[in-house]
Amino acid sequence: MNEMEMRRRLLADPRYLDAATETALRASPSLTALRASLLATDNAIAGVLGEALPPKGLADRIILRARHRRSTRWGLAMAASVVLAAAVTWIAVSGRPEAIAVAMIDHVIESPEELADNGHVSGDEARASLQRIGVSFRDAGYQIRHIGECVVAGRVGRHLIINTPEGLATLLVLPMKAGELAQRRVVSKGNFMAVVMPQSTVVIAAVGPGSATPQRLESLARQMFTLES
């Protein structure tokens, strides 16, 4: 497969990596740069479209007004298009508060080798590692399979993988930039779900299989960290 064909493959799906693609990426800085650019664009789009909604009640008001003016399928279709336009406008003016949440779940999806790690990290080791970024940690008695530094969205944090009765779970802790995440977010992607919780200086994500519940993931994080809200 030549470089042009590999570019077409990356443009079609930059997240799919088979042996041929990995070999081509190692041999070509330009292909590596292209994939990084495509992933960044994908993350930015997902951040904008992830969870934002139009202001409460706006959709109902637009549809009710359309019914009063013209109760036809055409009128309601036009009203629906206005609602969609309003939603897009609301997304645009509200910024991208969940971009970091998408980046965190993407990091888990793109790190299968860390999920495969089956080490035995002590609670003291985890506590010491997290203290270096100013985060307190409680040993809740789960097997910690992995802890290490990770780089997400250009910043260095910590990546823990633990065994739970429901299966593997990941906890990511990153320094948080002011104003980038105003409230708790739930993000689903592929076979994973993440609950992302902003704190005063860090953002914590609890990531599990898609079958997990947000309540269970948040409870897991609360067992190990003192969350502010």
Image (tube, helix red, strand yellow):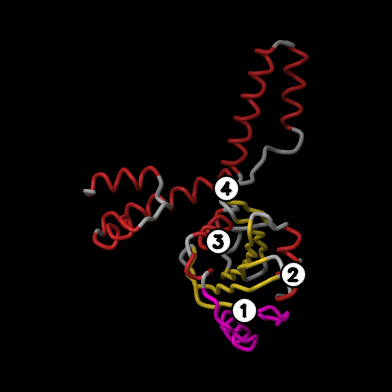
Whether residue 119 is in magenta: the answer is: yes
Give the mark nearest the N terminus, 2 or 1. Answer: 1
Structural crowding at the residue carrying mark 3, measured as other residues with C-alpha within 10 Å and reported as few (<14), some (14–19) or many (≥20):
many
The label nearer to you, 4 versus 1, is 1
Q: Which mark is residue 95?
A: 4
Element at label 1: strand
**Magenta span: chief secondary structure:** loop
Residue hosting label 1: 144
For this view, does 227 lie left or right of residue 93?
A: right
Q: Magenta stretch: give its range.
A: 117-143
Give the mark nearest the N terminus, 4 or 1. Answer: 4
Whether residue 99 is in magenta: the answer is: no
Query: Callout 2, which amino acid?
Result: Glu
Give the mark nearest the N terminus, 2 or 4. Answer: 4
Query: Callout 3, which amino acid?
Result: Met
Query: Callout 1, which amino acid?
Result: Ile
Give the mark nearest the N terminus, 3 or 2. Answer: 3
**Vertical side of 224 occupied by 176: above or below:** above
C-alpha span from label 2 to label 4: 24 Å
Residue hosting label 3: 104
Quadrant the C terminus occupies = bottom right
Element at label 3: helix
C-alpha span from label 4 to label 3: 18 Å
C-alpha span from label 3 to label 2: 20 Å
The label nearer to you, 1 versus 3, is 1
Whether residues under marks 4 and 3 lie with C-beta atoms below 8 angstroms apart, the answer is no
Q: Which residue is drawn at 73% across and 32% down?
A: 58
* Quadrant of the rendered image containing residue 48: top right
Q: Position of residue 17 (x, y in %)?
A: 39, 55
Query: Callout 4, which amino acid?
Result: Gly
The label nearer to you, 4 versus 3, is 3
C-alpha span from label 2 to label 1: 24 Å
